[in-house]
Amino acid sequence: MTAGQPGTVALVTHPACLGHRPHAGHAERPERLARVLAALEADRFRALARLEAPAATEAELCRVHEEAYVRGVLTREVPEGEVVALDVDTDQSSGSAEAALRAAGGAILGVDLVLGGGAKRVFVATRPPGHHAVRAGAMGFCIFSNAAVAALHARARWGVRRVAVVDFDVHHGNGTAEAFAPDADLFYASSHQMPLYPGTGKASERGVAGNVVNAPLAPGGGGGEFRAAWSETLLPALVAFAPELLIVSAGFDAHRADPLAQLELETDDFTWISERLLEAAGQCCGGRLVSLLEGGYDLDALAAAAAAHVAALLDA
């Protein structure tokens, strides 16, 4: 399917992403993606151009990850119905390698669409998520660092120098921060609960040139604290950085209903941050925005918040 006209908003996904199956009872389960996609079947979202995520190549992944780690994931044989633990929180099943390739490849396609003129904005609805994956391994439900892979692809294929990733997942995206911190032309901004897994993301963590900006939020914080962090700290830093492309790590686990954290956001708060990020993209980079699904573990809250986010992308 083609993406349509340059003003199109595209949805990128792939059925293989449902084939990543961690152990029974794992929070990052296939139903998460299924519920998001079901919500995006509503009439409200009929205008979305729908595309299948390609598989990322090893070379694309190795811009961020060590070759030995990538090869290990892609060549590991996992019997059907079994899992191999990649770390204490992250499993690999028989379908995980393809799912992870499609998740990273979907992020890459999103970049190609917005930089190549095939779409104005893109939501990549894939799994596993990516923002905890580090250079040498899986971490925190994440296998490949999808946002970082997409950012470095933008440089390699499109010659884009300054790329920003902003992250409103309730957990700090330590993997993205690790990839970006040494490079002054990459920018990472995050709001997240602290203390909480993975334990990184202090305000004092600033990167090589102030290019990492963290806004930790105390447990129990709600929309007021969240909006203040973005309005007063993160959004001004993003605009000052003046990226040529904006990538969003869109996690919805700061919702008050989420079982893995203790922030108190409502669905309206995700509409608000989506609108503010769209405004920033319009100001900085011609509206070019690629949004990647990260966390969110209460199925009802995830579906509602993700739908609100995509509605904002359509309304911009």
Image (spheres, grey):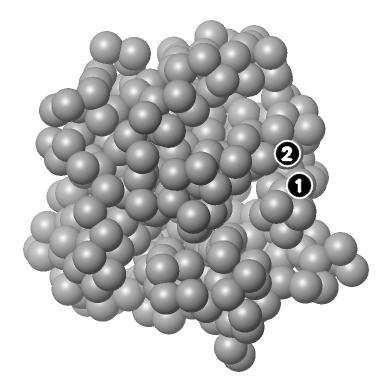
Judge the density around disc 2: few (<14), some (14-19), many (≥20) Cα neighbours within 10 Å.
some
At label 1, the amino acid type is Ala
Q: Nearer the viewer, residue 163 or 35?
A: 163
Q: Position of residue 55 (x, y in %)?
A: 37, 79
Q: Secondary structure at mark 2?
A: helix
At label 2, the amino acid type is Thr
Task: Name the residue rendered at 27%, 12% in the picture.
Answer: 204
Where residue 271 is drawn, which disc sits there? 2
Q: Are marks 2 and 1 in contact (CB under 8 Å)?
A: yes
Task: Name the residue rendered at 35%, 45% in the picture.
Answer: 243
Query: Where is mark 1, residue-wise?
Result: 308
Q: Quadrant of residue 92?
A: bottom left
Q: Position of residue 162 (x, y in %)?
A: 27, 48
> Quarter of the image containing the N terminus?
bottom right
Is 221 left, or right, of 91 in this rendering? right
Task: Name the residue rendered at 33%, 34% in the picture.
Answer: 241
Q: Position of residue 263 (x, y in %)?
A: 63, 19
Q: CA distance from mark 2 to mark 1?
A: 6 Å
Q: Quadrant of residue 225?
A: top right
Q: Nearer the viewer, residue 236 or 123?
A: 236
Q: Nearer the viewer, residue 265 or 162?
A: 162
Judge the density around disc 1: few (<14), some (14-19), many (≥20) Cα neighbours within 10 Å.
many
Task: Name the residue rendered at 57%, 62% in the picture.
Answer: 121
- The tag earlier along the polypeptide, 2 or 1, is 2
Q: Nearer the viewer, residue 34 or 152?
A: 152
Q: Position of residue 294 (x, y in %)?
A: 51, 48
